C-alpha cells in the first residue's frame, strides 16, 4: 500500500491552553481507505511521543512502512477495506505540522524554542479543525496508544457529539511523579547539551545530538520490560570477553546507543521537550468541569493494557476503567499478557489484535 | 446450549435493570438479558478468550479477576449482581458475596450441588473425588476450590445474615424440584436470590 502525505494550511487562529494563539499553522496528515458517502466510517489515529502522521503503508521508495502498519490496512484489525483512517502529525511536531522548526510568519524567523507549549487538549482541538476540513461529523473510532490514548480520552470529553468509540491503549489518566521524573531527566539531558544553545541550535547550525540521544536512550529503557531486555540481550557481550574499559561491552549498551543515534536523525530536540510537557500536564479528571463533561460524554470505550508495561501498567488503565464505570459509561477492558513492556502496543500479539478486531467489527456491525 | 439457570435468572430480572455479571464467560447471559429485559451493565471475566467472545457478543466486558477488582464498583450501583456457576472458583466466597451485597441491591448466585446423589455415590463407592458431567475435573487440576452442597450454602447464608429471598433447585432434566424435601439429594444445580 503506497501512501502520500498531505499538508494543509489553516488560516484560522487556534487559541491554546496556555493562552497563546497560533495565528495560522500547517497540519500534515495521511489517510488510508475511502471515506464513504455518509462519512460514517472515519477513524482518527492519534500518535504518541515520538510518532508522526505516517502510521501505515509505504512512502514511495521506503523499505519500512508506517509505525502501526501491522494494525492498520486491508484486512487488518483497523480494516481499511471498510474504514477511512486519518492520522495527523501533532502541532509542535517535527514531521510537517507546525512546530519548532517552522517559520513564525509574525517574525519571519524559525520558532525554535519559542514555539508555544501545546497540550493534549490543543492537539484534539487542532484534530477537530482537520475533521471539519473533511466535513466529517463523527469519528467512528478515535484510537491511540500511550500519549495517543490520552488524546482519544480527551476527544470523548471535549467533543461528545463527534465521537462514537474511543480506544485507549497502554495509557494513563495522568502521569505519576515517577513518570514526570523520567521526562524531566530527558529534558535535562537535552537542555544541558551545550549544542542546545538555549533552544536556538538551528540558528547556530548545531544539533544537541548527545542530549537528544540520551533522552531517547532513557525513554527506550522505560518502553521495554525487564523480561524482554533479558530475552533479547541478556548479558551478551559485543566482543567475546570483558575488556575492562568504558567502550561498548554489552549488547544492550550497543543497542541503546544505536537507538539514540538513529533517533537524532529523525527527531527534533525542541519537539521532544514539547511532547514530554504535554504528557506531564495531562490530567483531565482533575480539571474543572470534568463531572459535567462526563455526564455529556456519549462515547463507548475500549481500554487495553499490557501486563509487563511498567511505564503505564495495567493499574493505570484500570483507573480509567474505574472512572468510566463510576459514570456508567459503556466500557470494555482487556489486559493482555505480554512481555513487550510499554512498546507492546506497537507489536503483533494474537490476543491484542483479536480484541481490537472483534471490538471494531462488533461496533461496525452492531 | 440453553442453560436452565439463565431462564430462571431472566425471570427474576426486572426490565431496564442495571446488571453486574461476575465470571460472565462469553457474555451470553448479559446478551440474553439485553434482548429480553433491556438491561445495562457489565460482565467481568479473567479469561482473555472469554473477553474476546464477550466483545463479539457486544456486551461491556471487563477483563479482570473478580477476587480483587470489586473496588471498581460503588455501593448500590447495580440492581442485580450475578454470580452464575462461578462460586466454586472464588477464593473467598463469603467476602465476595459481602462485596456483591455492597454493590448491588440484590444478589443472584447459581452453583452446582455437590450434594447430588451421583456425587455422593461416586465418593462412597469409588472412594475418589467426584468427576461428573457438571464438574469434569480431577481433584488436582480443578479450578473449583470451593464446592458446596445446597445445605452448606444455606448454612453460610444463615451464619452471615444473608437473607434468602428466593431459591430454585432443579434436577438433571431441568425440572424445578425446589419444593421437594430431597432437593439437596436430587438437585444438580441451585440458584439463590439473596440480599
Image (spheres, coloured by chain):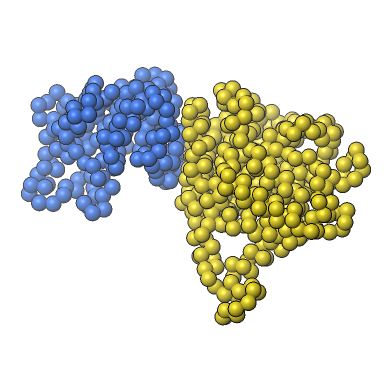
How far across and down, in percent of the image, does residue A330 sit?
50, 30
Q: Nearer the viewer, residue A24 or A135?
A: A24
Residue at (33, 30) in percent of width and height: B100
User: Where's the N terminus of chain B, which quadrant?
Assistant: top left
Counting from the top left corner in percent of width and height, residue B180 is at 12, 26
Query: For residue A144, which quarter of the picture?
Result: top right
Residue A313 placement, left or right of A48: left
Q: Which residue is pictured at 16% across the width and 47% down the height?
A: B130
Work out which quarter of the rendered image holds the C terminus of chain B and state it.
top left
Q: Is residue A89 visible?
A: no
Most extreme residue toward the left is: B125
Task: Depth check: give the residue in front, A110 or B13.
Answer: A110
Residue A194, percent from left and from top: 79, 59
> What residue lies at 11% left-to-right and 39% top-to-bottom?
B117
Q: Colour of chain A?
A: yellow
Q: Residue furthest top?
A: B15
| Total numbered labels | 0
| Residue B47 position by quadrant | top left
Q: Is residue B73 above or below residue A338?
A: above
Q: Colour of chain B?
A: blue
Q: Nearer the viewer, residue A349 or A246?
A: A246
The correct choice, above or below, for A207 with respect to A147 in the image is below
- A274 or B175: nearer the viewer: A274
Q: Is residue A16 visible to us here?
A: yes
Residue at the image point whose x is 10% and y is 51% from the top:
B127
Q: Position of residue A273 (x, y in %)?
A: 72, 48
- With respect to residue B45, does B154 lie above or below? above
Amino acid at each position: 500500500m503506497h501512501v502520500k502525505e498531505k499538508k494543509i494550511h489553516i488560516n484560522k487562529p487556534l487559541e491554546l491552553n496556555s493562552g497563546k494563539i497560533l495565528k495560522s499553522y500547517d497540519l500534515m496528515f495521511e489517510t488510508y481507505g475511502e471515506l464513504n458517502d455518509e462519512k460514517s466510517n472515519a477513524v482518527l489515529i492519534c500518535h504518541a511521543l515520538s510518532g508522526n502522521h505516517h502510521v501505515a503503508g509505504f512512502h514511495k521508495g521506503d523499505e519500512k512502512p508506517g509505525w502501526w502498519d501491522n494494525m492498520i490496512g486491508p484486512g487488518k484489525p483497523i480494516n481499511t477495506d471498510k474504514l477511512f483512517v486519518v492520522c495527523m502529525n501533532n502541532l509542535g511536531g517535527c514531521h510537517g505540522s507546525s512546530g519548532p522548526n517552522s517559520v513564525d510568519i509574525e517574525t519571519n524567523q524559525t520558532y525554535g524554542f519559542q514555539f508555544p507549549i501545546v497540550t493534549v487538549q490543543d492537539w484534539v482541538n487542532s484534530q477537530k479543525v482537520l475533521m471539519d476540513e473533511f466535513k466529517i461529523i463523527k469519528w467512528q473510532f478515535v484510537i491511540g496508544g500511550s500519549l495517543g490514548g490520552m488524546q482519544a480520552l480527551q476527544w470523548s470529553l471535549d467533543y461528545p457529539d463527534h465521537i462514537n468509540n474511543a480506544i485507549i491503549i497502554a495509557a494513563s489518566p495522568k502521569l505519576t511523579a515517577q513518570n514526570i521524573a523520567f521526562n524531566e531527566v530527558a529534558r535535562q539531558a537535552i537542555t544541558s547539551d551545550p549544542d542546545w544553545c538555549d533552544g536556538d541550535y538551528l540558528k547556530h547550525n548545531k544539533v544537541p545530538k548527545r542530549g537528544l540521544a540520551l533522552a531517547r536512550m532513557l525513554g527506550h529503557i522505560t518502553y521495554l520490560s525487564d523480561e524482554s531486555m533479558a530475552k533479547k540481550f541478556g548479558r551478551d557481550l559485543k566482543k567475546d570477553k570483558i575488556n575492562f574499559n568504558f567502550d561498548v561491552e554489552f549488547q544492550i549498551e550497543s543497542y541503546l546507543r544505536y537507538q539514540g543515534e538513529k533517533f537524532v536523525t529523525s527527531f527534533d530536540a525542541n519537539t521532544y521537550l514539547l511532547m514530554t510537557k504535554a504528557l506531564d500536564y495531562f490530567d483531565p479528571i482533575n480539571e474543572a468541569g470534568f463531572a459535567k463533561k462526563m455526564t455529556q460524554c456519549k462515547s463507548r470505550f475500549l481500554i487495553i493494557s499490557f501486563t509487563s508495561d511498567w511505564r503505564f501498567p495495567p493499574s493505570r488503565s484500570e483507573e480509567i476503567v474505574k472512572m468510566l464505570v463510576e459514570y456508567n459509561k459503556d466500557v470494555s477492558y482487556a489486559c493482555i499478557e505480554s512481555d513487550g513492556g510499554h512498546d507492546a502496543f506497537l507489536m503483533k500479539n494474537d490476543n491484542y489484535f483479536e480484541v481490537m478486531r472483534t471490538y471494531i467489527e462488533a461496533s461496525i456491525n452492531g | 446450549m440453553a442453560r436452565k439457570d439463565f431462564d430462571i435468572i431472566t425471570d427474576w430480572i426486572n426490565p431496564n435493570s442495571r446488571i453486574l455479571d461476575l465470571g460472565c464467560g462469553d457474555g451470553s447471559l448479559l446478551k440474553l438479558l439485553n434482548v429480553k429485559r433491556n438491561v445495562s451493565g457489565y460482565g467481568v471475566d479473567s479469561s482473555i478468550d472469554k473477553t474476546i467472545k464477550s466483545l463479539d457478543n457486544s456486551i461491556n466486558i471487563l477483563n479482570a479477576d473478580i477476587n480483587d477488582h470489586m473496588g471498581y464498583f460503588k455501593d448500590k450501583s447495580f440492581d442485580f449482581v450475578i454470580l452464575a456457576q462461578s462460586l466454586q472458583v472464588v477464593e473467598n466466597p463469603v467476602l465476595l458475596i459481602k462485596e456483591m451485597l455492597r454493590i448491588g441491591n440484590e444478589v443472584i448466585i447459581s452453583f452446582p450441588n455437590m450434594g447430588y446423589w451421583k456425587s455422593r455415590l461416586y465418593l462412597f463407592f469409588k472412594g475418589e473425588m467426584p468427576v461428573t458431567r457438571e464438574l469434569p475435573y480431577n481433584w488436582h487440576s480443578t479450578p473449583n476450590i470451593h464446592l458446596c452442597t445446597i445445605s452448606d450454602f444455606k448454612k453460610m447464608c444463615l451464619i452471615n445474615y444473608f437473607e434468602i429471598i428466593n431459591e430454585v433447585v432443579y434436577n438433571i432434566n431441568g425440572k424445578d424440584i425446589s419444593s421437594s424435601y430431597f432437593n439437596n439429594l436430587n438437585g444438580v444445580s441451585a440458584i439463590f436470590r439473596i440480599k
